[in-house]
Amino acid sequence: MHPMQAPKLKMPKGISDFRKLREGGYYYADKSNFVAEIAEAAEIVLIPRPRRFGKTLNMTTLQTWYERLPSGGTHTELLNGLKADFTPGSHHEKRGKIPVIFFSFKDVKEPTWADTLMQIAVQVTVEVRRLAPWWEGVSLDSELRAQLDALKGGKADRVLLSQTLRLLSETLEKVSGQRPLLLIDEYDTPVQSALVGGFFDDVVAFMRNFLSAGLKDNSHIWKGVLTGILRISKESMFSGLNNLDVCPLTSHKFASCFGLLEGEVEDLLVQAGLAQQSAEVKNWYNGYLFGQNTIYNPWSVISFVSDPVEGCQPHWVNTGDTRLLENTIADGDGILHKELEDLLVGTAIKKTVDDHVTYSRDGIRPNDVWSFLLYTGYLKANGPLQDVEDGVRVASLSIPNKEVTVAYRKLVRGWTEAKLGRSEEVTTMLQALVIGNEQEFGESFRSLVNNTLSHYDVGRKQAESFYHAFVTGMLVGLGATHFVRSNRESGAGRYDVMLIPKDFVKYPGVVIEFKIIGKNETPDDALSAAHAQIDEKKYVTELEAQGATRILKWAIAFKGKEVFLSLR
């Protein structure tokens, strides 16, 4: 088969329901070992994973394996011959024998609290109607039946809605003689929307009551399984729930159940006649580490195999609502932006990581930014997390692959445009920088700083880092003609910024060194020190090694919003 010919496989792009996937004859990477692992897990399990890494598919697999329908029928035959079928374990004891309560909040992404509550009520009504045949014609307490009828008819108030899980589990155990399995998929999606929409307290208060009613000291359920992107702090949503086992992506638990393993990707590419593309697919979509397993992004791999003619594209990053991520980056300080620039040029950073990322009404706490990026799939841990004192863990973090690099470049560009706009002035200024027009660059850059930056931005102790990030963010606009390098080793030190032209005939190389003017220092002193550092540390070594015969050495010094520069 030609590598660009359409695959013969029937790819399940956009299909996250196990039953539909199996009945439709779609390609399936066998993850049914999840069924056996859940049977041996704690009573209540929370499994945070990045979006589109197979959470809903695994939850519907659990439902298919365990569920007995009100009619007495099952769908367990859809797992015949899969791993769960021939793996020994206690999961066989309840195969097709118990009721299943299933809620998915993945589509609850409303702009207001009123709309969010209405959408949750719709989800409740749909599920209650699906389960209602269990108790129809069965003698129930009149008050309980009235409550169930209100839920079924979409007439429940907020208090009754919050008691849904308790009422359903109690009723199903009573009428079936079996404690049900409780599945709650993407539990934190409403919270993410609330952070952007400004109704965080309302959503958290409701979800706390909703989950507590179903999970805290509820003897009427067999097990509860929750998935989401992040763990919301115990104080915010899981207060008093002492039987909750959180299994983040750094845990060995369920490490092979989400995403695609390297062998699974290689097998898929062979079956699709695309084995020649394996190196490109790896470069674009590989790089995640779940437990000790190297993981590929399943959504992107499946999207590529579904339509390989266009080659690898940023499928995953183009499908998600990144407003929370964008707000987190945009609100960060200069240090954060500089570290993002380090990541973009391939430099790993060492950071404290906490499994318990805490949402608040103001968004992600500054201390949790790196944990947030790790657990949402925008960073990877380069090896196991290292334990240090007082339960703190540290990880070496880097960008996992080319696809996520694209996402970061968009974020940096967005941050820069928020500060600078899309004016022709910026384009003209950057061109003056790379050709060495000192007067034009100086006038444009000073005007830009005065018009766009605040004294708060440049008046802090991290002012040099802020200016570094500010300038490097602007330089993203040179991506078509230059490689931008930040804070990397060359010669005997680490330069601030380097521009390596893609065409050495057309453009000279560029080295930029930043200095904050000291209390007893003149602008000329700071500029001279910057030039001396460029020369003494031999920062031009990397450019010369790549063939540059012309090199511009820019020294840029700052004092508050005052800018001084010198070109040699």
Image (cartoon, helix red, strand yellow):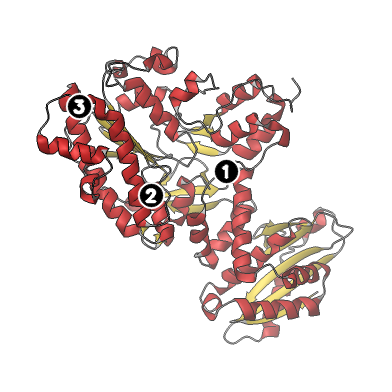
Which is in the foreground here, disc 3 or disc 2?
Answer: 3
Q: Earlier in the sequence, mark 3 or mark 2?
A: 3
Q: Which mark is residue 226?
A: none
Residue 489 percent coordinates (x, y): 67, 57
User: Do we see residue 278 in this rendering?
Assistant: yes
| Rendered residue at 37%/53% (across/down) | 115
Task: Please rate how many residues cluster around mark 3, counting C-alpha atoms within 10 Å: few if below 14, some from 14 to 19, many from 20.
Answer: some
Alpha carbon separation for disc pair 3 and 2: 30 Å
Q: Which mark is residue 135?
A: 3
Res 508 quadrant in image: bottom right
| Rendered residue at 69%/80% (across/down) | 446
Front residue of 361/476: it is 361
Q: Which mark is residue 400?
A: 1
Residue 539 percent coordinates (x, y): 73, 63
Q: Residue furthest left?
A: 141
SS label for mark 2: helix
User: Do we see residue 235 in this rendering?
Assistant: no
Residue 362 percent coordinates (x, y): 39, 63
Res 359 quadrant in image: bottom left
CB atoms at circles 2 and 1 under 8 Å apart? no
| Rendered residue at 28%/34% (across/down) | 128
Please name the residue that numbered disc 2 is placed on. Answer: 190
Judge from the rendering whether residue 115 lies leftward or rightward of residue 214; answer left or right: right
